[in-house]
Image (cartoon, grey):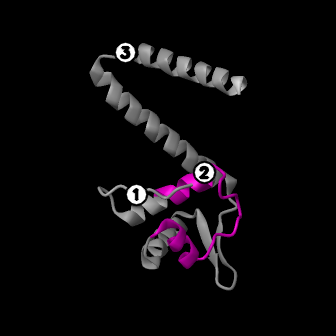
């Protein structure tokens, strides 16, 4: 995954979000050891202090934990990961609705669009 940043938000917040997405998508597995701060910073092209700040926040949230002698690891709490994943889904859906309702779409129309998109997505997956 390429690390891409938006100039409108602090880098460490973007790092938190990128790492969260990697965890909740399973790209970084439950209980998996993370690369060192320096390695992660180098991969992302950021200052190690910025990466450290992001990782410290993920620790506060419980998604990552430190073992002094062995490094940092993703939580083994699968329920926490599912909860974070669900929050992301609800947030994106809420944003979608908030952006489309002012355009005159009814909730029923939005549901139909979502169902249609999901069906088309299934068809595209089975066609591959």
Q: Foreground mark, 1 or 3?
A: 1
Q: Foreground mark, 1 or 2?
A: 1
Towards the viewer: 113 or 62 = 113
Towards the viewer: 85 or 3 = 3
The C terminus lies in which quarter of the figure? Answer: top right
Residue identified by numbered label 3: 106
Give the residue at x 43% y 78%: 49
Residue 21 lies, in percent from the top left, at 55, 52
Residue 2 lies, in percent from the top left, at 52, 56
Residue 124: quadrant of the picture: top right
Of pointers 1 and 2, the one earlier in the residue sequence: 1
Residue 66: quadrant of the picture: bottom right
Whether residue 44 is in magenta: the answer is: yes
Residue 55 lies, in percent from the top left, at 51, 70
Marks 1/3: CA distance? 34 Å
Q: In the figure, 18 relative to 116: above or below? A: below
Q: Which mark is residue 5?
A: 1
> Tag 3, which secondary structure?
loop
Q: In the figure, 96 relative to 52: above or below? A: above
Marks 1/2: CA distance? 19 Å
Of pointers 2 and 3, the one earlier in the residue sequence: 2
Mark 1 touches mark 3? (CB < 8 Å): no
Residue 80 lies, in percent from the top left, at 61, 54
Residue identified by numbered label 2: 24
Give the residue at x 40% y 57%: 5
Residues shaded magenta: 17-45
């Amino acid at each position: 995954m390429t690390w891409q940043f938006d100039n409108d938000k602090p880098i460490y917040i973007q790092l938190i979000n990128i790492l969260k997405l990697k965890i909740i998508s399973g790209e970084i597995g439950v209980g998996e050891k993370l690369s060192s701060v320096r390695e992660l910073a180098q991969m992302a092209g950021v200052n190690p202090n910025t990466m450290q700040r992001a990782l410290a926040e993920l620790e506060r949230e419980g998604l990552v934990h430190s073992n002094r002698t062995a490094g940092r690891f993703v939580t083994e709490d699968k329920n926490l990961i599912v909860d974070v994943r669900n929050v992301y889904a609800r947030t994106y859906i809420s944003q979608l609705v908030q952006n489309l309702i002012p355009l005159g779409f009814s909730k029923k129309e939005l549901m139909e669009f979502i169902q249609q998109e999901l069906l088309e997505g299934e068809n595209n997956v089975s066609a591959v």
